[in-house]
Image (spheres, helix red, strand yellow):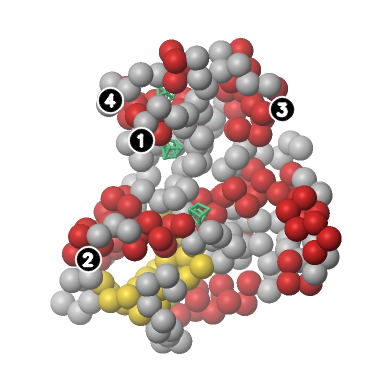
Amino acid sequence: MAKVKCAWFDFTSCEGCQIELTNFGEPFVELLEHVEPVEFREAMSEKTEEQIDVAFIEGSFSREADRRRLEQIRARASIVVAYGACAVSGGVNAMKNHTSDYAEEVYGEDAKRPHLASQKALPIAEAIKVDFIIPGCPIDKAEFVRVVEQLVHGTTKVYVPSYPVCVECKRRETLCRYDDNDHCLGPIARAGCDAPCPADGIPCEACRGMIDNPNEAAMEKVLVENGKLPERWAKDKTRMFTANHRGDA
Ligand code: SF4
Ligand code: SF4
Ligand code: SF4
């Protein structure tokens, strides 16, 4: 069986999802028996203009100038996978969509330099058709490998859980952050990562996005009353990775 030609592309991101894969070791190396990487900036210098079977796109769509490149990738890829929160939802980049002075805060007097100009940080699905998503910031490496295995076998549907992280957390018998005088977004966060953060003693920040129909207002109330967060922080927490589906300022 011919190997599946895959290329990895990055847009506005920290490229941490690519780095996760380069750090994965053996399971990723085993994938290479079935997959031929033809472009992968963090791991190889070769580039390609050829047709590819699967394009993995990391990073958000935050400059109109990137639309053409995204369209070109779409035109020569049979399958497009948005991977990582930046590509799937806009990720942490989208927090800037709720503020007007982010550029000055980050870049100071360099803020007006032309190469720093950007629009709202959006999911890449705002520019091109996306076939599959792999959420997370960074992605869960094991989930990535599972998805690639499914694609290699010609799947037409990739399963992403719709239940909350609390389910996986309870399954692991992890001490709840709220029982340790902490806060946590687990009740409205989309599972699929096996709840590593509470298991490590830190709150879930919903990096995989929200469950379907999350009650963010109730979550914010819990964050304030039980998690002891100031009201403003509670709101910022619930949109840290999901700023684009929250219309409120
Ligand atoms: S999803 Fe997170 S780790 Fe991945 S590129 Fe974006 S910011 Fe980096
Ligand atoms: S620690 Fe977080 S994810 Fe785990 S049960 Fe408590 S609220 Fe849910
Ligand atoms: S526990 Fe929450 S923050 Fe941690 S990886 Fe899972 S979804 Fe992301």
Query: Residue 128 is drawn in which quadrant?
Result: bottom right
Residue occupying the far front of the picture: 109
Residue 223 drawn above or below residue 27: above
Whole-percent x, y for residue 243 in the image: 64, 43
Nearest to the observer: residue 223 or residue 89: 223
Q: Which residue is mark 3?
A: 232
Mark with earlier residue (3, 1):
1
Mark with earlier residue (3, 4):
4
Q: What amino acid is found at the position of numbered circle 1 in the picture? A: Pro
Circle 3 or circle 4, nearest the eye: 3
Mark with earlier residue (4, 2):
2
Q: Which residue is mark 2?
A: 29
Relative horizontal placement of residue 66, taking residue 139 as reference (left or right): right
Indicate the quadrant of ligand 2 in the picture.
top left
Per the rendering, the mark at residue 148 is none
Q: Specify the quadrant that holds the N terminus.
A: bottom left
Q: Which residue is mark 4?
A: 171
Query: Residue 247 is drawn in which quadrant?
Result: top right
**Residue at position x 76%, y 66% in the image:** 117
Asked which secondary structure carries label 1, the reply is helix
Q: Which residue is mark 1?
A: 196
CB at disc 1 and ligand 3 closer than 8 Å: yes
Relative horizontal placement of residue 209, taking residue 117 as reference (left or right): left
Asked which secondary structure carries label 3, the reply is helix
Whole-percent x, y for residue 7 in the image: 39, 74
Whole-percent x, y for residue 140 in the image: 36, 48
